[in-house]
């Protein structure tokens, strides 16, 4: 992926341990978004991956400058639907913002229980 695209990764906020279930959802969210970039974006398309530790949670954003798509259109794939379901199972959300010709942004927000914040 790195040889095909100009990728930037940024991690901000005070890093802290996450419960195993949240780690898996964050990892799978990033994997799914990057797999879609690899599948659909042309070589050279820029990718931004941001992982932000915020008070009470974690936010993962993956943006690409690929061809985009209509998120409301029917699809045979399970990837993004599965991502939304996994995020919801742990009390989080996953959203996809895209439009034909406008790239895609996948945002995963996960709550981090207060006991893991200290």
Image (cartoon, rainbow, N blue to C red):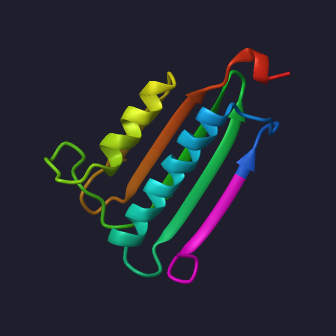
Observer-nearest residue: 21 or 14? Answer: 21
Can residue 27 be seen here? The reply is yes
**Location of residue 31 in the rendering, given as x and y in whole percent from the top left corner:** 50, 57
Q: With 101 as the anchor, is 97 left or right in this view?
A: right
Apparent side of residue 2 relative to residue 89 in the rendered image (left or right): right
Was residue 99 drawn as part of the magenta stretch in this picture? no
Give the answer, above or below, for where 91 lies relative to 29. Answer: above
Above/below status of 115 relative to 61: above
Front residue of this view, candidates 103 and 88 = 88
Q: Residue furthest left?
A: 74
Which residue is at 72% across, 23% downward? 55
Q: Residue at x 24, y 54 (%)?
A: 77
User: Which residue sits furthest right?
Assistant: 118
Tell me which residue sits at (51%, 49%) in the image: 28
- Look at the image and tell me in which quarter the C terminus lies: top right
- Where is residue 105 drawn, in percent x and y? 43, 50
Q: Is residue 72 left or right of residue 10?
A: left
Residue 7: which quarter of the image? bottom right
**Residue 2, picture quadrant:** bottom right
Provide residue 36's location: percent of width, then percent of height: 38, 62
| Highlighted range, magenta | 1-10
Q: In the displayed orientation, state which residue is furthest to the top.
A: 114
């Amino acid at each position: 992926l790195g040889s095909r695209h100009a990728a930037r990764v940024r991690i901000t906020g005070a890093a802290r341990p996450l419960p195993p279930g949240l780690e898996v959802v964050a990892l799978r969210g990033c994997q799914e978004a990057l797999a879609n970039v690899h599948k659909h974006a042309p070589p050279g398309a820029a990718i931004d991956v941001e992982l932000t530790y915020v008070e009470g949670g974690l936010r993962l954003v993956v943006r690409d400058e690929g061809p985009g798509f209509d998120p409301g259109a029917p699809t045979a794939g399970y990837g993004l639907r599965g991502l939304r379901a996994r995020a919801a199972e742990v009390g989080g959300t996953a959203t996809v913002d895209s439009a034909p010709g406008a790239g895609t942004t996948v945002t995963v927000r996960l709550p981090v229980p207060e006991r893991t914040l200290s």
